[in-house]
Structures are given as C-alpha cells and as structure tokens.
Amino acid sequence: MQTEKPSDPKPIQALLCGSTVGAIVKKAQLLNKIEHSLSTLLAKEMARCTHVLNLKESCLILTSNNSAIATRIRYREDELLIKLNRMADLPEITRIECVVRP
C-alpha cells in the first residue's frame, strides 16, 4: 500500500494571505513599525516606558507605566501627529491616546 506524499511545502506568506492569522500578523507588523517610528521621536526615557497598544480608526493608542511620561506625550500630541504622518509607509493617524498602566 502506497501512502500519498504531502505536497511541496508552501511559503508561509502564501498560507497567511487572506486568513485571519495573516491579518493579525499584518496588524502586528504595522504596530511594531509604528512603535519603532515613535521611539525615534521620543527621548530614550520616554520610549522605554511607552508602547503601542493599537491603531483603531486612525487613533493611535499607547500605554505607559509612568503617568508623568503619559502626560508629556499628551502635551506633545500635535507635534507627534505631524511627525508620524510625515513618515512613509504609515497610515494616517489623527489622534493619540495614552493610557497609564503601572
């Protein structure tokens, strides 16, 4: 009795295209890119304490474990929006929310 050979392996991108997992991976890559871009705009102490949680309806949601840094980000929202929106390969961001999570 002969068993069927599995087909040739497919590239991971081919398996992920159009799937729910693929959409999640794509969103995670986008959030990672935004976090990296944001870290270049913030001072090191601020970047270490600030992380991207989500991008929902053009609103960038950040978290910080330090309320003083969250306040500084809120004060710099307009400046950060202008600089982030000038960066290539990022979607338009119209608002920034910063949540404190100790």
Image (spheres, rainbow, N blue to C red):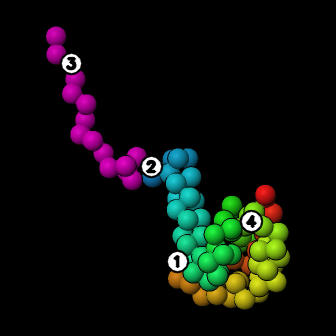
Q: Up-down: is 75 above or below 51?
A: below
Mark closer to the chain start, 3 or 1? 3
Mark closer to the chain start, 3 or 4? 3
Mark seen at residue 89: 1
Mark seen at residue 3: 3
Q: Residue at x 74, y 70 (%)?
A: 59
Q: SS of the residue at dot 3? A: loop
Local crowd size for mark 4, using a 10 Å CA cut-off: few (<14), some (14–19), many (≥20): many
User: Which mark lies nearer to you, 4 or 2?
Assistant: 4
Residue 60 shown in magenta: no
User: Which mark lies nearer to you, 3 or 1?
Assistant: 1
Rounded to the nearest angstrom, the CA distance separating label 3 from label 4 is: 55 Å
Mark closer to the chain start, 1 or 2? 2
Which residue in the protein does label 2 denote?
16
Q: Quadrant of the C terminus?
A: bottom right
For residue 80, which quarter of the picture? bottom right
Rounded to the nearest angstrom, the CA distance separating label 1 from label 4 is: 25 Å
Q: Amino acid at mark 4?
A: Ser
The x, y position of residue 32, in whole percent, is: 55, 65
Q: Are marks 2 and 3 in contact (CB under 8 Å)?
A: no
Mark closer to the chain start, 4 or 2? 2
Which residue in the protein does label 4 denote?
64
Mark closer to the chain start, 2 or 3? 3
Q: Amino acid at mark 2?
A: Leu
Mark closer to the chain start, 1 or 4? 4
Q: SS of the residue at dot 2? A: helix
Q: Is residue 68 visible?
A: yes
Relative to the observer, which residue lies in front, 44 or 76? 44
